[in-house]
Amino acid sequence: MASTAMIASLGPLSLSTPLVAASGTIGSVVEFAAVTDLSAYGAATAKSVSPVAWPGRAAPRVAPTEAGMLNAIGIQNPGIDAWVADIGPQLSALGVGVIGSAVGYTVDEYVTVAAKLAGCDLVAIEINLSCPNLEGKGMFALDSQATADVVRSVRAAVGLPLGAKLSPNAVDVGEIAAAAAESGADWVTVGNTVWGAAIDIERRQPKISAGIGGYSGAAIKPIAVRCVLEVRQSNPTLPILGLGGVQSGEDAIEFMMAGANAVGIGTAHFGSPKIGRKVLRQMQTWCERHGVSDVQELVGVAR
Ligand SMILES: Cc1cc2nc3c(=O)[nH]c(=O)nc-3n(C[C@H](O)[C@H](O)[C@H](O)COP(=O)(O)O)c2cc1C
């Protein structure tokens, strides 16, 4: 049979494939473009950027676990002005649409970063709501009102397609997704890392300096798929970028069946920088074997 149509979209953001490279796992995208062919991705998301440079946390910041990895990088980044000056001019030559990622401690900080990102050659902006919130109590993405405040303010400041990156640590991720959508997000990214910790029993200390960090990789896939199912169930028409532990085409199809319109790949890049091509090829093979003419037919079929 003819090959399966593989295009996708996240609201107004058109994607040439359903795969998106996840923030923080491919550097600024520029470094990643130097080692891998990006044509497997419909878009690639840059590392989150804050209003001023963040140095990140002290080492050790990453620890492998039995399944997956723990990290507490602390969103080390050069700050938006340096990012715009250094990375901005290189974006158009990368051969893939780049999604800029904004992070901050306050609503105003998100707006400042997003407005400056909007002046760069980006296809969209993702708001990383899964970071500490000094204005309130914990992560923005744990609270509907805090999520709505950020999304509404950023929406008013930028015209680019806008995604809100949510957290699997939220008690009711469907409710947070609804708040993001009502405030102007074009899609929700579901989701980020899961809080975790590991102890080095010889040193009798946590393995990462922060003590508690973000757990990612294959082991979190069932948690992320559960979150996508919940968001799809409570928000039937909201575009979803699903991610968490994707390593194969079958994993990506699982996310789409749960309700994701597109699928992100994160931690798997550290072991296999070229994994996107493999995942896309496996998706195509699976679809062709199962008589699927358009990959979008699979979105949300599992109920
Ligand atoms: C080392 C590392 C750094 C990350 N940095 C960011 C970041 O800066 N911004 C962001 O939105 N997500 C960040 N993430 C989260 C990933 O984009 C992704 O949401 C998460 O790891 C779950 O997907 P995965 O299991 O495929 O990695 C980071 C993840 C890792 C492992």
Image: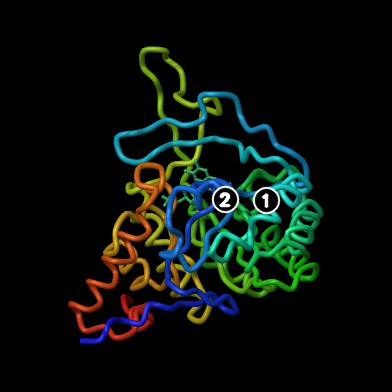
Q: How many marks?
A: 2
> Residue 12 — which label?
none
Do the residues under discs 1 and 2 have CB atoms within 8 angstroms?
yes
Q: Quadrant of residue 298?
A: bottom left
Residue under the image location 31 percent in, 69 percent down: 253
Residue to which mark 2 is pinned: 30
Residue under the image location 68 percent in, 54 percent down: 102
Q: Position of residue 175 (x, y in %)?
A: 56, 67
Name the one closer to the observer, 227 or 110: 110
Q: Quadrant of residue 150?
A: bottom right
Does 62 sit left or right of 181 as displayed?
left
Q: Is mark 1 within 8 Å of ligand 1?
A: no
Does 28 sit left or right of 273 as displayed?
right
Q: What secondary structure is found at the residue carrying circle 2?
A: helix
Residue under the image location 38 percent in, 77 percent down: 6
Which residue type does callout 2 highlight?
Answer: Val
Query: Mark 1 or mark 2, which has the lower sequence index?
Result: 2
Name the one closer to the observer, 39 or 28: 39
Residue to which mark 1 is pinned: 87
Name the one closer to the observer, 83 or 36: 36
Way the structure is coloured: rainbow
Task: Work out which quarter of the rendered image holds the C terminus and state it.
Answer: bottom left
Q: Is residue 244 above or below residue 12?
A: above
